[in-house]
């Protein structure tokens, strides 16, 4: 039997826990804000060490989605869901139960695939709720579009840091050879970039290296590679006080969410070292832009969605200008950029 309980968290509109002993479901959904529209954010399945670890992750992710949607100019709020467990526990019953949990938000939270969940899982979710996007036959798998948005963002970062968006001969160290990182690597290699890649699944890293003419290093070594760009494309927190001193890149621009362990402290540390950070929720907004286009009048249109992803370039240039004008780190500038739309909408309520 599905049991749903509230988790009071200051600064968040709604946070709930769901447990279903029969299916093994143990999940949390966090809605950070619906000021700009319904909260949209993916459904992550991960083997968290504890519920507290899962709660910390879903809170950070949902807040990031608020800023991601705002910076991208979308009429969406921020939310996220996490399931505690492993991919081996997947079942139709589990996702049906999760679909009921999503439905309990009455349309205020819309889900999509994320780490360890796929369009097929979303199809099961869709049997219990209409609050799901990224289905086959519509926008589908958002990973290629997330990768494309990252590539658009990379060009803005390269131009800002090097004076040119040309990637020929530039070394890009990609941490994470999954569904987004692998495609991102191909886009870079096609433009003459040199790929160095690492993944906890060595076979995945080797495959990307073979496809791009790149080289493989260990996950422990990727952050210290002598490179032009470090691209975190795995889980968050890879840029932190322990790793920042060893980062050799001039630019950080990747697909992972919450790359900075502490936005202000780590963002400022990067600025002091002269490393340009492309704020993650601006750079990786392509997937969100893609699924959002399922919700607009007339339904999904790929050409329109890709056209909107091109705005990531201009958004980053505006954020870099704010950072320079105010003498602040780019992560803080991105928050200010996102706050403008949220504050304007809140003033109308």
Image (cartoon, rainbow, N blue to C red):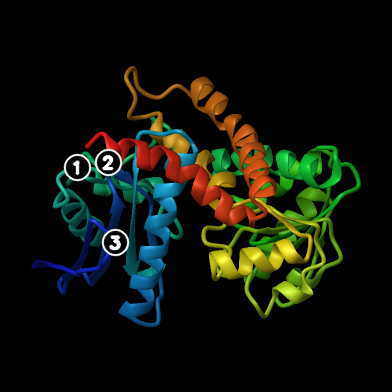
Give the class, few, some or many, for how many residues have Cα within 10 Å of label 1's Cα (few <14, many ≥20).
some
The answer to which of marks 3 and 2 sits earlier in the sequence is 3
Between 47 and 319, the residue placed more toward the observer is 319
Give the alpha-carbon distance from disc 3 to disc 2, as whole Å: 17 Å
| Residue farthest toward the right in the current orientation of the protein | 169
From the top left corner, tell me how far across and down residue 135 is, in percent: 36, 38
| Residue farthest toward the left in the current orientation of the protein | 1
Give the class, few, some or many, for how many residues have Cα within 10 Å of label 2's Cα (few <14, many ≥20).
many
Q: Which mark is residue 107?
A: 1
Give the alpha-carbon distance from disc 3 to disc 1, as whole Å: 20 Å
The answer to which of marks 2 and 1 sits earlier in the sequence is 2
Disc 2 vs disc 1: which is toward the camera?
A: 2
Quadrant of the frame with the C terminus:
top left
Q: Which mark is residue 38?
A: 2
Give the class, few, some or many, for how many residues have Cα within 10 Å of label 3's Cα (few <14, many ≥20).
few
From the top left corner, tell me how far across and down residue 141 is, in percent: 47, 41
Between 97 and 163, the residue placed more toward the observer is 163
Residue at the spot 36% in from the left edge and 29% down from the top edge: 294
Q: Contact (CB < 8 A) between labels 2 and 1?
A: yes
Quadrant of the frame with the N terminus:
bottom left
Q: Contact (CB < 8 A) between labels 3 and 2?
A: no
Q: Which mark is residue 272?
A: none
Res. 55 in view:
yes
Residue behind mark 3: 11
Give the alpha-carbon distance from disc 2 to disc 1, as whole Å: 7 Å
Between 112 and 201, the residue placed more toward the observer is 112
Describe the element under mark 2 as helix, strand or loop. Answer: loop
């Amino acid at each position: 039997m599905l049991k749903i309980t509230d988790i009071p968290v200051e600064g968040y509109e709604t946070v709930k826990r769901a447990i279903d002993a029969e299916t093994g479901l143990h999940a949390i959904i966090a809605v950070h804000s619906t000021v700009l529209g319904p909260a949209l954010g993916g459904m992550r399945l991960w083997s968290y060490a504890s519920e507290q670890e899962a709660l910390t992750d879903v809170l950070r992710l949902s807040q990031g989605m608020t800023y991601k949607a705002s910076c991208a100019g979308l009429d969406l709020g921020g939310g996220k869901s996490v399931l505690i467990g492993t991919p081996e526990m997947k079942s139709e019953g589990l996702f049906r139960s999760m679909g009921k949990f999503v439905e309990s938000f009455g349309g205020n939270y819309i889900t999509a695939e994320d780490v360890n969940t796929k369009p097929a899982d979303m199809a099961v979710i869709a049997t219990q709720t209409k609050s799901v996007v990224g289905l086959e036959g519509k926008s589908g798998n958002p990973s290629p579009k997330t990768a494309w948005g990252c590539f658009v963002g990379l060009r803005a970062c390269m131009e800002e840091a090097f004076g040119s968006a040309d990637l020929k001969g530039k070394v890009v160290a990609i941490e994470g050879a999954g569904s987004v990182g692998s495609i991102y690597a191909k886009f870079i290699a096609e433009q003459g970039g040199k790929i160095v890649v690492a993944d906890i699944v060595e076979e995945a890293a080797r495959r990307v290296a073979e496809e791009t003419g790149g080289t493989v290093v260990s996950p422990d070594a990727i952050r210290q590679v002598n490179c032009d760009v470090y691209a975190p494309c795995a889980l968050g927190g890879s840029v932190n006080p322990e790793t920042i001193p060893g980062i050799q890149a001039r630019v950080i621009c990747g697909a992972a969410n919450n790359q900075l362990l502490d936005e202000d402290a780590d963002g400022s540390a990067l600025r002091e070292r002269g490393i340009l950070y492309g704020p993650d929720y601006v750079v990786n907004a392509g997937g969100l832009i893609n699924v959002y286009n399922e919700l607009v009048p007339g339904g999904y249109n790929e050409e329109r969605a890709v056209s909107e992803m091109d705005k990531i370039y201009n958004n980053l240039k505006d954020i870099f200008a704010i950072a320079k004008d105010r003498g602040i780190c780019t992560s803080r500038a991105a928050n200010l950029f996102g706050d403008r739309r949220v504050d304007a909408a809140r003033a109308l309520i």
